[in-house]
Image (tube, grey):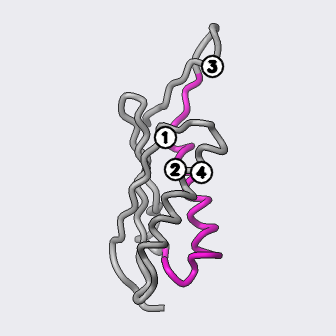
Amino acid sequence: MNYYITHNSSKGTLNISDYVFSQIGQERLEKLAENELKNSISLKLTKNKKNIETLIDKNNIQINVSIFAIRNSDIQNAVLTIQKEVYDAIYEAMEISTIKVNVSVIGFVDL
């Protein structure tokens, strides 16, 4: 487990686990898949695998999102929406802006 470290006062630090970032992103991604992107993406991956992985290196946060695209959908718009919404969800929760969101389309599925 890796941690994002921030000094929250003169008395100590706040250490935020990579799991927290993944959880926030996953929740937002699931809402998108159920609502506005329901005809564009699928989140079905192998059993017990999440769609979001967080990497923290020297306090740089990288969020990697893996999705399946639904054939004949506007996947470029879906990817841009995912990047913006995952970034915004984490920023709203933590007020941390040093986040990079990468989206990988790992396959295509039919509706």
Q: Nearer the viewer, residue 66 or 78?
A: 78
Q: Which residue is mark 3?
A: 8
Give the image location of residue 73, x and y in percent: 45, 85
Q: Amino acid at mark 4?
A: Asp
Crowd band around label 4 with a 10 angstrom C-alpha radius: few (<14), some (14–19), many (20+): some
Disc 4 or 1, which lies upstream in sequence?
1
Q: Quadrant of residue 25?
A: bottom right
Give the image location of residue 68, x and y in percent: 41, 75
Which one is closest to the eye, mark 4 or mark 1? 4
Magenta residues span 14-42
Give the label on residue 18, or none: 1
Q: Amino acid at mark 2?
A: Ser
Q: Which residue is mark 2?
A: 22
Marks 2 and 4 sit apart, C-alpha to C-alpha, by: 13 Å
Residue contact between numbered discs 1 and 2, judged by CB atoms under 8 Å: yes
Q: Please report the residue visible at 60 percent of the width from the left and 43 percent of the height from the top.
A: 91
